[in-house]
Image: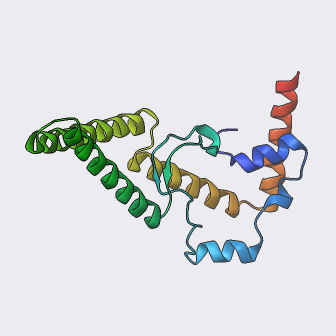
Amino acid sequence: GAGVPARVRAACASGRDAVAMRPSPAARGRRMRGARAAPREGGVMMAGSSEGGQENEGFRLRTNGDVIKFGFIATAALFGVYYLLQAAGVERDTAGNLVGGAIAIGSVLLWTGSYVFRVANKDMTYAKQLRDYEDAVLSKRYEELSEEELQALAAELENENKQKRS
């Protein structure tokens, strides 16, 4: 069962014919000519994602416009804090130092937190590239299987499923 694409395992588990799931020759030809994969959704994620491709709801910056809007809002909020500190009686220079220090410390803490979070979830660039490469290799091997090999694989997976149910 190891090294078998998940869609083949899913097809066998659901009783569908794995041979029918094989990409058409035209689709294989497009992939072989270097057609690029569909762009991934997302962008800068400010919240984590769970396994299985289901993402947690959270604050996300999906487009460049979102990043620009966030920048304006954050800047306005910091100016607001600066003027509130002055209104509360803090001297102008001290208020500037407090806001600047908060930006510096907050930035370092956010960057460090996001880094630790990505490492803990194996969401680093190398890990993603390795997963993508392994998926591409498995997909390529699957595409190169003959009809007989696909039928033998489907039969093997059906036997494994029957053994698991027993």
Task: Please name whichever residue, 56 or 16, is drawn nearer the observer in this view of the structure.
Answer: 56
Q: Quadrant of residue 89?
A: top left
Residue 2 in the figure: left or right of residue 111: right
Foreground of the two, 71 or 150: 71
| Residue 8, placed above or below residue 48 | below
Q: What x and y, as percent, mark residue 34?
A: 55, 75
In terms of depth relative to the viewer, which is nearer, 14 or 4?
14
Residue 61, placed above or below residue 52: below
Residue furthest to the top in view is 166
Q: Position of residue 101 (x, y in %)?
A: 17, 39
Q: How is the image coloured?
A: rainbow
Quadrant (top left/top right/bottom left/bottom right) for the N terminus: top right
What x and y, as percent, mark residue 88? Answer: 22, 35
Position of 131 with respect to 120 (left or right) is: right
Residue appearing at x 62%, y 45% in the figure: 53
Residue 19 as seen in the image, left or right of residue 61: right
User: Which of the 4 image quadrants contains residue 146?
Assistant: bottom right
Quadrant containing the C terminus in the rendered view: top right
Q: Residue 163: horizontal and vertical position, in percent?
A: 84, 26
Name which residue lies at 79% across and 54% down: 150
